[in-house]
Image (spheres, rainbow, N blue to C red):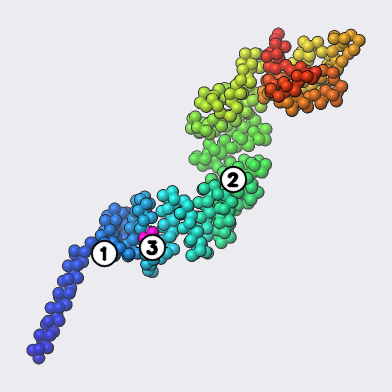
Amino acid sequence: MEITTYIAFGFFIFLILIAGILIFQYLTSPGKIEDAEQLINKGHFKDAIILLEKLLEKDERNPNVNFLLGLAYEKIGDYQNAILYYKRILKFGRYNQKINEILVRKHLAYALESNGNYTEAKNEYLILTKIEPSNADNYYNAGKLLYMGKAYQNAISLLKQAVNINNRHFNALTTLGKTYFYLRIYNEAKINLEKAKDVDPKNTENLYYLAQTYRYLGEFSKAIQVLDIIEKDQALKPKALLLKGLILIDTESYSQAISELDKAIVYINKATNEDLLAHYLLAIAYEKTKNISKAIEHWEYIHHIHPDYKNVKEKLKQYAEFKTSDAIKDLLISNRLQFESYFRKILDKLNLKPLLINIDNDSMITAICSDSGQHNPYKIQNILVRLYREMQPISETQVREFHDKMKTENAARGIYITVSEFSSSALDYCNNRPIELYDNKTLAKLLEG
């Protein structure tokens, strides 16, 4: 009886000792994984890292500890250290119910991408497509990185696979559409961007690419409708107005283009590329509406900021005569009837009698004239005269076409008059031919008085 009592008492003392040891270990241990998880959930990432690094000293291969360390570093934006711990898990190959290869590779791919290691990130997403082939996100993420690297052809197959798995995957659809857009395959771009619009009709970035696609396909009214929606997004409003102005210029709706572009320059930051483009487009629109003074204002604004922007320097040079000659200024802004009147006065100054005058378009007028026998009273010759009032230099092609017209009209001589100048190749072509070339300076003298 006494022996049994001693044994029971001894066992009780043993249990107390064991409990004491466990309590002591708990109180003196660096902490538990659950504590680290709670710290991460509360946003105390640095405290979690300190605790987890102590736990790692006990078991450096522990997948839970390594993963939580990677996660904590990922949360504070230290992607380099996050990558290190995620790669350790893959190296050791120890997984459990909570930490598996798919989870680790997804976080590793995200950390690599965030750290700018796009090739490695893409490779991780490609591995995930093999492990998890039914997940559209893996194909999309790999395709997106190829798209970002402008490897458009390679991106297409992966993005298509993402769409095949999930035909309402907005990111895959819009990125596929943009990929086709940059490859200039506009019909395919339109199909995918419209599908993306069906999934998310309010995503203005997708709509902006769709509007550009409509423009390139010549579907201008659709483009304008989409841009009207985008304008409500203050962040994209300047771009939307700028693109709308460009489309209106494409459709020769110059007055409307001016209205939209005037709005655009209010919202666009000054001296940016968008600002320069807006002023350049305004200059084009004003030039087309014969408001040359306003066009010059916008070219001069651009020239002050960026003297070598597009053909601004050449435009200002071309219109130098406009600023010094009121007669040329009036000629440029005249309507069709006034244009013909100016032309008749020029012919009169040249002592030429018009037999037939044809207004080819708003910028060009051509006449078959007689010299009234002024060179030879016994031989009256036909002379072809053309006046051109666009400011780009006359090319050799234009002069050749004029020469062919002379032959058709049986004209012995030709006179080509421009408010601009003649290209060097045009001058060379006329060297040994009966064609007289009158540039803006000669024209200014003809128009005097």
**Residue identifier under label 1:** 58
Residue at 35% in and 53% down: 81
Q: Nearer the viewer, mark 3 or mark 2?
A: 3
Q: Residue furthest left?
A: 2
Q: Amino acid at mark 1?
A: Lys
Q: Which mark is residue 182?
A: 2
Question: Which quadrant of the view contains residue 250?
Answer: top right
Q: Nearer the viewer, residue 314 or 365?
A: 314
**Residue identifier under label 3:** 91
Instruction: Please tell me whether residue 181 is drawn above or below residue 270 in the rendered image.
Output: below
Say which quadrant the C terminus sits in. Answer: top right
On the question of residue 25 being in view, the answer is: yes
Say which quadrant the N terminus sits in. Answer: bottom left
Q: Amino acid at mark 2?
A: Tyr
Kindly report the secondary structure that dominates the magenta region of the rendered protein.
helix
Residue at 64% in and 42% down: 216
Residue at 66% in and 17% down: 329
